Image: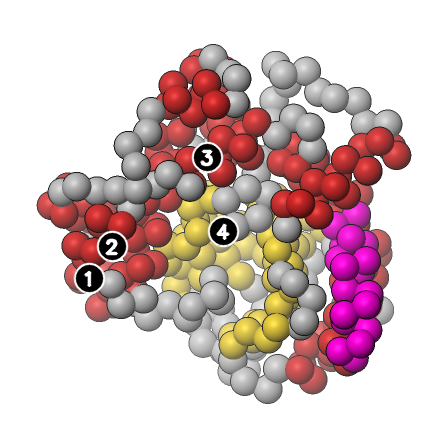
Amino acid sequence: MFKQKLKQLIESKLTEDGLFETGVKGVRLFRVTEGVRCSPAIYEPAVIAIVSGTKEAIVDGKSYVYDAEQYMCCCMSMPVEAGTPNASKENPLLGVSIALEPPMMTEVTMEYERATGVTRQPRSSALPPSIVLSSWDECFSEALYRILQLTQSAADTAILGESRLREVYYAILKGNAGASASRAFGVDNEIARAIHYLSSRLDKPITIDEVASHVNMSRAVFHRKFKQATSLSPIQFVKSMRLNTAAMKIVGGMTVNEAAMDVGYVSTSQFSREFKRLYGQSPKQWSHDRQVPAGLL
């Protein structure tokens, strides 16, 4: 019931391709009618819910294809390849992107853990993945519909926006993605803090020992936990974040040299070699072949 209402509401708001700001911080609607093959992107913590069409994200070779049956929850900043390969005018991609704002998400997670008596997992326990596909359930569908209803009134948005966003966050914690969200925003969020630390220092030299020490872990434990959560080793993660960020900057208009220096490479030739090894083309060749719609991946 709610899915059909959501689709009708989004269709009424979006008459052309692009992003639509709802007025609630971090909540945006989108419409895509052109197929875009998967390209480098950085996913920040967010939930993406599709009401029509399909989207794809690839992490370390693993493909996540999701549609109106499952929403995607990314709990930590992640380097991905993402696209809308099946979008067309006949079958437009319609959906909602909801940023998981750390202060509010952490607050809701802490309250949820206290209210439900969640037992802290031992540090030796395996971590859930940072990207997970979760089945739509009635709680999530209703919470999503209620927050999008606010787009019809600026006063409702201003007064009720934050409380409706908390409802969405609560629904996520109760759903299939709850374990991943809790570990990213709850008490035991060492890997999320490590990723934030790494992501904020892409343009600087950094060692794995330094990051492990930052989150009070031994190098061995940190390496194992990091790979459990992200499917990438810390070194692979940093390299992918740097190259993906640079690729996005090049598509956005930066020169290859500027983009390389901006993400910490001191040698443009080294950057070009690693770029070609990952993407199969030189940075210049790659940029000529791709025009990625900003914000839609």
For the residues labelled 4 and 1, say whether their Cβ atoms are less than 8 Å apart. no
Spatial separation of the CA atoms under disc 3 and disc 1? 27 Å
Instruction: Identify the residue under disc 2.
Output: 259
Instruction: Identify the residue under disc 1.
Output: 255
Amino acid type of the residue that numbered disc 4 sits on in the rendered structure: Tyr
Spatial separation of the CA atoms under disc 2 and disc 4? 19 Å
- Residue 99: name its quadrant: bottom right
Q: How many marks?
A: 4
Q: Secondary structure at mark 2?
A: helix
- Residue 28: name its quadrant: bottom right
Would you say 265 lies left or right of 156 here? left
- Residue 237 is at least partly visible in this image: yes
Q: Is residue 154 magenta?
A: yes
Amino acid type of the residue that numbered disc 3 sits on in the rendered structure: Tyr
At a point 63% along the width and 16% down the height, the residue shown is: 123
Instruction: Identify the residue under disc 3.
Output: 197
Amino acid type of the residue that numbered disc 1 sits on in the rendered structure: Thr
For the residues labelled 1 and 2, say whether their Cβ atoms are less than 8 Å apart. yes
Q: Nearer the viewer, mark 4 or mark 1?
A: 1
Amino acid type of the residue that numbered disc 2 sits on in the rendered structure: Ala
Spatial separation of the CA atoms under disc 3 and disc 4? 16 Å
Spatial separation of the CA atoms under disc 1 and disc 2? 6 Å
Segment colored magenta? 153-170
Q: Nearer the viewer, residue 267 or 297?
A: 267
